[in-house]
Amino acid sequence: MTDVLSEENIETILSAMGQQEPKAVEKKRNVQVYDFKKALRFSQDQIRTLSRIHENFARLLTSYFSAQLRTYVQIHVDAVEQLSYHEYIRNVRKKSILGVFEAMPLQGSMVMDFSPNVAYVMFDRLLGGQGTVLEKDNELTEIEISVIERVFSKSLESFQEAWSSVLKLTPELKEIEVNPQFLTMSPPNETVILVKLSARIGEVEGFVNICLPHVVLEHILPKLSAKHWLANQKKAVESHELEALEEKLQGTKMEIKAVLGKSTIELGDFLNLKNGDVIRLNESYDAPVTLLVDNKTKFHAQPGVSKGRMAVQITEVTVAGDLSDED
């Protein structure tokens, strides 16, 4: 007779073994908080393109400041991020110097600001000092305004060159401002791109920021894709380098040798050579002359005389021997 366990017996056995009925696993939902006031209007692809553009701008700015300030300068892109215009203005450091500029055909204004350390060390170097950071409480003098306007204008030339791979811009400085609260070029909630450039001038560290409102870049956003940017950059580089390469090649000097033939003789015979001796070559008198350019076989020629001087006339361009070195 088969013993059959009742449900009550099964529960008793399970309890004795310390086992309990499995609880249902609760699934946690991964919820991210989204702030609709801070809408992200630039894709990651566009952010990367803007970063590449301004990495080039940082290199150009490094070269310009190094030459003008006659000291060690290093500038690099620290971050490229999008935030609201209100956040940008709120985080501008006190005593920063801001240059408002436009760049046709883009519609709208942009801002480039120098931190106090960078601005005042430039003042000191350009006015003949050693690069000391001077704390100033008074307003900028006319001389200082003239100096900083020149610095901004030259920096915008580098900005124009950096953007040339995407769009031909014509930047123009509109005004110099020291109080960011007076800047009303965008609504507070307008999304802007903030390009943070870390700057080191001598022993002084600071930053250069560039604020690019979305409304200014809106019409060229399709051109900020990596594919479009790389294609345009390649064409621009090829066109630009072709003229420079051709100019350099015009003045390049190359060694050209005309080889009538070769022969092998013993060392003793070589040491006893004297005027009138004849060395027999491995080529016949009517065989073409081999022409070497930088020790590479490039042409075949025939010997002759031109204007009373020995010369050769090219008769054939070699192909197989282009990459082979002659021993």
Image (cartoon, rainbow, N blue to C red):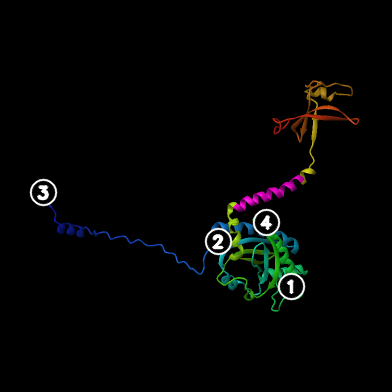
Circle nearer the N terminus (1, 4): 1
User: Is residue 214 in view?
Assistant: yes
**Distance from Cα at disc 4 to Cα at disc 3:** 91 Å
User: What residue type is disc 1 on?
Assistant: Ile
* Residue bearing mark 3: 2
> Quick one: quadrant of the C terminus?
top right
Circle nearer the N terminus (2, 1): 2
**Distance from Cα at disc 2 to Cα at disc 3:** 75 Å
* Residue bearing mark 4: 164
* Residue bearing mark 1: 145
Circle nearer the N terminus (3, 1): 3
Circle nearer the N terminus (2, 3): 3
Circle nearer the N terminus (4, 3): 3
Q: Position of residue 5 (x, y in %)?
A: 14, 54
User: What residue type is disc 4 on?
Assistant: Ser
For residue 42, which numbered disc appears in the image? 2
How many residues crowd around disc 3 within 10 Å: few (fewer than 14), some, or many (20 or more)?
few
Q: Name the dominant secondary structure of the magenta segment.
A: helix
The mark closer to the camera, 4 or 3, is: 4
Helix, strand or loop for disc 2: loop
